[in-house]
């Protein structure tokens, strides 16, 4: 066999970083597969009928140094001004301890969503701290572990209210003092669901009997601080719900939504130490009354016990989620903002309640002083009661003052034609105030207005305590903080320790150099509504990345707005619906979705106002073409779209994909192709050439954005030209359609990661990554075949970039898919995707990043597990008391009595485990049922900590 390094490295080492197997290892792997080159394997795997004609070509790939130099040039085209625009985004100081130990630490940012609780206890504790913080600040019992952004959270609260209300009304009231993007996103969400949105003044226009719920912004977008107790009482009188969008920092000083009687509170925790990032990512929160918890969207961390009865954290009430409920799910939210929620929670741990309150007081005092100066200078300033934001009437001077502000390198908010909004944040210094006064033509000094700092109505002061749990009262020395963060990180298994072979989730390398630019101030400290001439660097980045993604996918236009894959699905289906509407075909409202689709697909279709028609899978896992054709025909001119995944969720390149597209088009429908599996396509085939009209790309899967333990993500959508006019718009940037996210380019700052990835890899490197991803998956499949049944293969017996292992044959021996997943933890691995798309199977996706040694360790572990199963099958070991059923093993299993029919060594050190670098899960198997039965979603009392520490 001839396999020279040049087959693999056509130019330099630029792509070596992302590609696990070395050239000689790849040759060995090809030998195992019986092919004589990587390209031969690809030819056997990817049908010729879908292959792209021309290779993917971009400019020459950059070295790390070239990349950093280039990113610096681009960053410098952004101008970092002080921002007083407010409108839900604020300057904030990220404590360096958090930046370095969390945001820049792969132990935190490369973790997966905590579906395997035993290896996720660290981030689950941090998220529980987050929920406790939110619950305390809002005065509501239950909080979730984050949503995508404030506007999306407001829209989720609206639909949640509709689910639980006993009111018959179909209208929803929105406070006109909500931030404009919040109103717009709620309107977008409401339209397909038939909800009428009434925007008005809560004091004059709210008729509780006419609505199923109402939402208020607190403080309002122009600064007002109002008490909504009376309105909420009136809503309750009419069986409607009251929702408050609250600034969590303001809640350290102000009466909390719970005390106003609110049923739900939402908001953004951005100003808790998470930079603005030109729109994100940051964590939105949602809290609600206990009675509503089953209707809550998003993930909720809860407390349970492990097999020894010790306290253990886990995700609770998962039956609400789309994986199970599909189109009946509470929402389509899958990837959320875990990493940013963790940062915000540490900000609260770092400052404690007194520290947060002091920050809020300083902000209020400065806003107060600013107002004094402006009033003394003759300006009319509103409102009377405010926290951090004031609005100044400036008449015809608006343009002049905005410009004078810019000369001081400060951005103000343009409000209407004659007003200016000013919002103070943690970063505003006394000198900033003087500069603002100067811009308004006033000469005042910081000492002119000594502060009395309560500009709140007497009855709006906060009266209840918050953050009383000891975790928010650590010793304030950084030593303790640093060690707490390290302790939690050590409890988790992330990519910095082992492969995370998650089918469909593509847990690839997130290279250090790709992560570096996101914390540069030129990318992080930019308000999403900053003037266009200050964000030329961002525009260049977004344009070039869009262009590259269009070339990769064969689409004509991209929208960077959606903050996750699921939001991309929702945005894409809205785009399709708008297209049909524009052609006078608004009656098209059916969406064909294969039974094997990811749960977010039907959940998103429901949100877009479409009815889901489920299409069967054939025996071999492919879409059942006859059933598809029959259902498309039956749908007739109601057919709006189909949603397919390619390669299929079964990990196969279906030969019939072009036909599926053709049938859909023949009936007037549009093809939505779920792009989560793009890691099997880049450089080899293009969705836009196969026949699809729109796709989302999970940049946090295929394009190197880290998973962050469950977010952030970015799910931009690509569309063919005919759909481009119907992509999401935004109040700040225009467009005919409504927005799906709070910010025009979603979580813009992390686009830098995907851009860096493309620039480092070049077209050839990206193509090589795809090929090696397919090689790695086929290598695992080949090595495990025999020991395990590999379900679903293409016509040459190959899988795509992932493979599915059947565990159902072990049922007779009483061994479940969970037992294997937990036993993999003893071997130092995160389990593959469990029971999706087929119940009781494991879906393995190694990605191109894993070395042959790591693949071999994984194979060794699974073969060893198979031998253990065989021992149970033969009756050599007890069906209930064996290493599989008792997995995972902890250090607790090393001490005390031992009454098991296998050795401690076998239990704790199976074949895949490292001896010295052994990963020890902190808890034994977690009891899921117990946790849902005794639901606790905030930090448990100290005694349980004492017990855990014993
Ligand atoms: C991950 C995934 C999604 C959803 O993406 P999120 O970013 O988690 O919302 C949708 N479809 C498939 C096939 C996926 O794997």
Image (cartoon, rainbow, N blue to C red):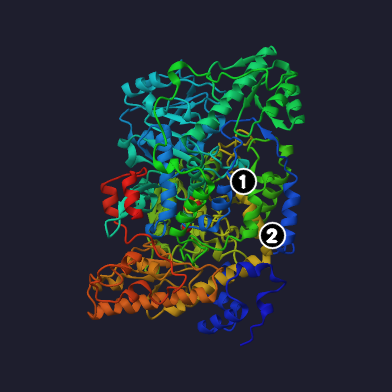
Residue 214 at what x, y percent from top left? 42, 26
Q: Quadrant of residue 399?
A: top right
Q: Is residue 803 left or right of residue 366?
A: left
Tell me if I can see residue 209 in this picture.
Answer: no
Q: Which residue is mark 1?
A: 748
**Residue 497 in view here:** yes
Of helix, strand and loop, which one carries label 1?
A: helix
**Which is more toward the observer, 215 or 862?**
862
Q: Residue at x 37, y 31 (%)?
A: 263
- Residue drawn 66% across the image and 30% down it: 429
From the top left corner, tell me how far across and down residue 882 is, in percent.
27, 72
In the picture, the disc for residue 320 is none
Q: Quadrant of the C terminus?
A: bottom left
Give the residue at mark 2.
759
Return the x and y of residue 58 as percentages of the image width and height. 71, 62
Which residue lies at the image location 35% right of the left edge and 59% below the top edge? Answer: 923
The image shows residue 107, relative to residue 48, as above or below, that is above
Tell me the element at label 2: helix
Q: Is 824 drawn above or below residue 287 in the view shown?
A: below
Real-space CA distance between mark 2 and mark 1, rounded to the nearest whole angstrom? 17 Å
Left or right of residue 662, residue 207 in this image: left
How packed mark 1 is, by other alpha carbons closer than 10 Å (few <14, some 14-19, many 20 or more), is many
The one nearer the camera, 441 or 568, is 441
The answer to whether 24 is drawn above or below residue 597 in the figure is below
Which residue sits furthest bottom? 1
């Amino acid at each position: 066999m001839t396999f020279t390094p040049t087959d693999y490295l056509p130019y330099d080492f630029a792509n070596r970083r992302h590609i696990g197997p070395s050239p000689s290892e790849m040759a060995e792997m090809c030998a195992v597969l019986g092919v004589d080159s990587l390209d031969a394997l690809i030819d056997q795997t990817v049908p010729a009928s879908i292959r792209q004609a021309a290779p993917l070509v971009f400019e020459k790939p950059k070295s790390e140094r070239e990349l950093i130099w280039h990113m610096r040039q681009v960053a410098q085209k952004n101008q970092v001004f002080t921002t007083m625009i407010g409108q839900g985004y604020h300057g904030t100081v990220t404590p360096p301890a958090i930046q370095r130990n969390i945001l820049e630490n792969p132990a935190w940012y490369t973790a997966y969503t905590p579906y395997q609780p035993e290896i996720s206890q660290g981030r689950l504790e941090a998220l529980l701290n987050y929920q406790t913080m939110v619950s305390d600040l809002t005065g509501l019992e239950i909080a979730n572990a984050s949503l995508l952004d404030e506007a999306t959270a407001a829209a989720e609260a609206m639909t949640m209210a509709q689910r639980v209300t006993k009111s018959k009304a179909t209208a929803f009231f929105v406070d006109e003092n909500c931030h404009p993007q919040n109103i717009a996103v709620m309107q977008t969400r409401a339209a397909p669901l038939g909800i009428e949105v009434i925007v008005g003044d809560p004091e004059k226009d709210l008729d509780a009997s006419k609505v199923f719920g109402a939402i208020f912004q607190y403080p309002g977008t122009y600064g007002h601080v109002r008490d909504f107790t009376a309105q909420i009482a009136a809503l309750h009188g009419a069986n409607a719900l009251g929702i408050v969008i609250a600034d969590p920092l303001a809640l350290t000083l102000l009466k909390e939504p719970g005390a106003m009687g609110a049923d739900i509170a939402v908001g953004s925790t951005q100003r808790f130490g998470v930079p603005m990032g030109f729109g994100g990512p940051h964590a939105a929160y949602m809290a609600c009354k206990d009675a509503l918890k089953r209707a809550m969207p998003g993930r909720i961390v809860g407390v349970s016990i492990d097999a020894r009865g010790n306290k253990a954290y886990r995700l609770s009430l998962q039956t609400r989620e789309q994986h199970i409920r599909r189109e009946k799910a509470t929402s389509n939210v899958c990837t959320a903002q875990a990493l940013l929620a963790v940062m915000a929670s540490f900000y609260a741990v770092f400052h404690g309640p007194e520290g947060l309150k002091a920050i809020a007081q300083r902000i209020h005092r400065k806003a107060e002083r600013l107002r004094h100066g402006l009033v003394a200078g003759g300006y009319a300033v509103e409102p009377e009661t405010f926290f951090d934001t004031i609005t100044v009437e400036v008449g015809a001077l608006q343009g002049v003052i905005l410009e004078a502000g810019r000369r001081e390198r400060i951005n103000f908010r343009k409000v209407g034609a004659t007003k200016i909004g000013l919002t103070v944040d943690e970063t505003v210094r006394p000198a900033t105030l003087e500069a603002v006064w100067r811009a308004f033509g006033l000469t005042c000094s910081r000492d002119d207005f000594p502060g009395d700092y309560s500009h709140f109505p007497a009855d709006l002061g906060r009266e209840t305590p918050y953050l009383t749990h000891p975790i928010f009262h650590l010793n304030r020395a950084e030593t303790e903080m640093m060690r707490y963060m390290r302790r939690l990180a050590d409890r988790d298994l992330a990519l910095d320790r082992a492969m995370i072979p998650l089918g469909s989730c593509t847990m690839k390398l997130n290279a250090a150099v790709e992560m570096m630019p996101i914390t540069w101030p030129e990318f992080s400290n930019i308000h999403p509504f900053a003037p266009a001439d200050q964000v030329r660097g961002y525009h260049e980045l977004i344009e070039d990345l869009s262009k590259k993604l269009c070339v990769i996918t064969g689409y004509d236009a991209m929208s960077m707005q959606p903050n996750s894959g699921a939001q991309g699905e929702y945005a894409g289906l809205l785009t399709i619906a708008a297209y049909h509407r524009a052609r006078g075909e608004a009656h098209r409202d059916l969406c064909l979705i294969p039974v094997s689709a990811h749960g977010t697909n039907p959940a998103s279709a429901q949100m877009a106002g479409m009815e889901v028609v489920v299409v069967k899978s054939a025996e071999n896992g492919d879409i059942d073409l006859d059933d598809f054709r029959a259902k498309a025909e039956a749908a007739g001119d109601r057919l709006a779209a189909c949603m397919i995944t390619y390669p299929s969720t079964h990990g196969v390149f279906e030969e019939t994909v072009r036909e599926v597209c053709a049938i859909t088009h023949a009936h007037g429908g549009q093809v939505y192709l779920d792009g989560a599996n793009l890691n099997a396509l880049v450089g080899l085939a293009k969705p836009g050439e196969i026949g699809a009209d729109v796709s989302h790309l999970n940049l946090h899967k295929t394009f190197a954005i880290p998973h962050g333990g469950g977010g952030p993500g970015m799910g931009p959508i690509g569309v063919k030209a005919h759909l481009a006019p119907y992509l999401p718009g935004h109040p700040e940037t225009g467009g005919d359609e409504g927005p799906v996210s709070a910010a025009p380019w979603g979580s813009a700052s992390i686009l830098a990661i995907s851009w860096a990835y493309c620039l480092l890899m070049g077209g050839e490197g990206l193509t090589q990554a795809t090929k090696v991803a397919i090689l790695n998956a086929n290598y695992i499949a080949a090595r495990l075949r025999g020991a395990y049944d590999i379900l679903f293969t293409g016509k040459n017996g190959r899988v795509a970039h992932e493979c599915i292992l059947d565990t159902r044959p072990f049922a007779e021996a009483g061994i479940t898919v969970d037992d294997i997943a937990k036993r993999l933890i003893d071997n130092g691995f995160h389990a593959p995707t469990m029971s999706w798309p087929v119940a009781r199977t494991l879906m393995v996706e190694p990605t191109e990043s894993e070395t042959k040694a790591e693949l071999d360790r994984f194979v060794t572990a699974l073969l060893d597990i198979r031998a253990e199963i065989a021992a149970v099958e033969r009756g050599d070991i007890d069906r209930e008391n064996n290493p599989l059923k008792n997995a995972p093993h902890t250090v607790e299993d090393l001490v005390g009595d031992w009454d098991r029919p296998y050795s401690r060594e076998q239990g704790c050190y199976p074949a895949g485990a490292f001896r010295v670098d052994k990963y020890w899960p902190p808890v034994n198997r977690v009891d899921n049922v117990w946790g849902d039965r005794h639901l606790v979603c905030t930090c448990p009392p100290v005694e349980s900590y004492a017990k855990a520490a014993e």
